[in-house]
């Protein structure tokens, strides 16, 4: 039974970053050499006044252009409303999953907790939001216990299918309920971590395998890139 | 008591060189990710290596600590994570298979009690030739498998 499915050709988050790097080893090598040369020549000015095209690794991560998220109405695990206004004024790391998910979701939430710890030293307001794609099983209490286990300030969000739809569509998130494997109630879902900017626009998607160190670095590169290139 | 009796039995069986002795199969780094209270399913990870000269295959697993254990693989395809059930994992001579976060894992369903970091839990691996291998898994915090700049 499918609760929501976006056509495959609309998926912007499909290509894992590694594929891109693997298929163009020479361009990566050349880019690295150029970076090394430029860094040698201009020192730190490179990071402060970078070139317009995004860094090679970022091209697989950035959306073609920031996409505004429309209005939606969900609830967080405390029962408070979670709508578009909760995305304004801070960066949001968004991940879609469900609490009965044994491997991918806890793996990703552990990565997000690691990223949040690293972010602690930055003066950048940010939040982490886990959106349940399994509202029938993930009630507020269960969702709250689940997200807070990974980090006290994580926010669990849920809403029934109709309410979830605008957010799923805006972010090209797919959700497919799988035929029961031993009654496990497994759900296939988009596995990328989405990055939403303080204007409630989705700007990037990090595909697995997720590396906390790489994402922390790319988060800084994305902020710098948008600062220089966003009109 | 039960576990002791089981280990004694396994040792005896090993001494007689029966199908219990999977000595060519080396299991390293077995661990289970601690899960939030009430989580209905956990995941177990390990590396299984066939150092023998004959082909083998992992065909299943069971544990008294869980209602059911299944071999699963998380597959990332078309931007989605999907879980695929594996009936068996082939272990050709000289090859190793890693069970790790986001890939192969033992899906541990319906824990009989809360599974906490520091616990040691026995899971019996079953092989295609009828051989069995009890392996003790360490329970670790969720951050144990996180990649940081290429390292776990």
Image (cartoon, coloured by chain):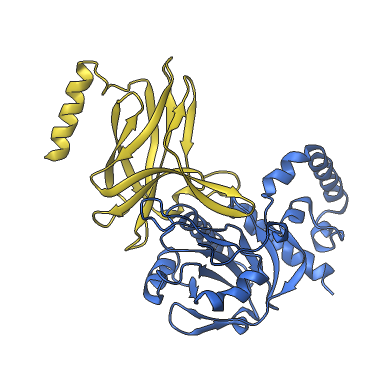
Q: Colour of chain B?
A: yellow
Which of the pair B58/B17 is nearer the observer? B58
Which of the pair B103/B84 is nearer the observer? B84
Q: Can residue B62 be seen from the camera position used here?
A: yes
Q: Quadrant of the N terminus of chain B?
A: top left
Residue drawn at (62%, 78%) of the image? A87
Q: Can residue A125 be seen from the camera position used here?
A: no
Q: Is residue A20 above or below residue A212?
A: above
Residue drawn at (80%, 39%) of the image? A29
Locate residue A157 relative to residue A38 in the image: left or right.
left
Which of the chains is blue?
A: A
User: In terms of image quadrants, where is residue A96?
Assistant: bottom right
Q: Position of residue B9 (x, y in %)?
A: 16, 27
Which of the pair B98/A27 is nearer the observer? B98
Q: Position of residue A93 (x, y in %)?
A: 60, 67
User: In terms of image quadrants, where is residue A112?
Assistant: bottom right
Q: Is residue B27 above or below residue A167?
A: above
Q: How many marks?
A: 0
Locate residue B144 relative to residue A193 in the image: left or right.
left
Q: Is residue B58 above or below residue A155?
A: above
Q: Position of residue B144 (x, y in %)?
A: 44, 49
Residue drawn at (23%, 45%) of the image? B64
Q: Is residue B26 above or below residue A199?
A: above
Locate residue A124 relative to residue B41 in the image: left or right.
right
Q: Position of residue A192 (x, y in %)?
A: 61, 58
Residue at the extreme left? B1
């Amino acid at each position: 039974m499918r609760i929501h499915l976006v056509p495959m050709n609309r998926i912007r988050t499909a290509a894992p970053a590694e594929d891109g790097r693997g298929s163009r080893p020479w361009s990566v090598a050349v880019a690295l050499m150029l970076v090394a040369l430029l860094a040698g020549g201009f020192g730190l000015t490179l990071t402060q006044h970078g070139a317009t095209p995004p860094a090679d690794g970022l091209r697989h991560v950035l959306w073609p252009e920031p996409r505004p998220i429309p209005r939606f109405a969900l609830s967080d695990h405390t029962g408070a409303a979670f709508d578009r206004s909760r995305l304004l004024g801070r960066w949001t790391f968004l991940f879609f999953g469900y609490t009965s998910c044994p491997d991918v979701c806890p793996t990703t939430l552990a990565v997000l907790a690691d990223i949040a710890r690293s972010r602690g030293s930055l003066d950048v307001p940010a939040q982490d939001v886990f959106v349940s794609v399994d509202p029938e099983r993930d009630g507020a209490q269960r969702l709250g216990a689940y997200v807070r286990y990974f980090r006290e300030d994580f926010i669990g969000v849920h809403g029934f299918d109709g309410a979830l739809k605008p957010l799923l569509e805006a972010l090209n998130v797919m959700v497919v309920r799988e035929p029961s494997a031993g009654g496990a109630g497994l759900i296939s879902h988009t596995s990328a971590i989405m990055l939403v900017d303080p204007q409630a626009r989705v700007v990037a998607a990090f595909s697995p395998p997720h590396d906390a160190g790489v994402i922390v670095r790319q988060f800084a590169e994305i902020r710098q890139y948008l600062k220089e290139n966003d009109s | 008591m039960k576990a002791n009796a089981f280990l004694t039995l396994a040792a005896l069986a090993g001494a007689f060189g029966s199908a219990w002795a999977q000595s060519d199969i080396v299991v390293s780094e077995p661990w289970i990710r601690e899960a939030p209270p009430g989580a209905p399913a956990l995941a177990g990870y390990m590396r299984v290596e066939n150092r023998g000269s004959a082909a083998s295959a992992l065909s299943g697993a069971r544990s008294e600590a869980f209602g059911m254990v299944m071999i699963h693989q998380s597959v990332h395809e078309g931007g989605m994570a999907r879980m695929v059930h594996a009936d068996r994992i082939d272990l050709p001579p000289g090859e190793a298979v890693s069970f790790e976060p986001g890939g192969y894992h033992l899906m541990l369903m319906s824990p009989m009690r809360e599974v906490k970091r520091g616990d040691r839990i026995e899971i019996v691996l079953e092989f295609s030739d009828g051989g069995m291998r009890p392996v003790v898994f360490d329970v670790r915090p969720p951050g144990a498998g996180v990649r940081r700049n290429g390292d776990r």
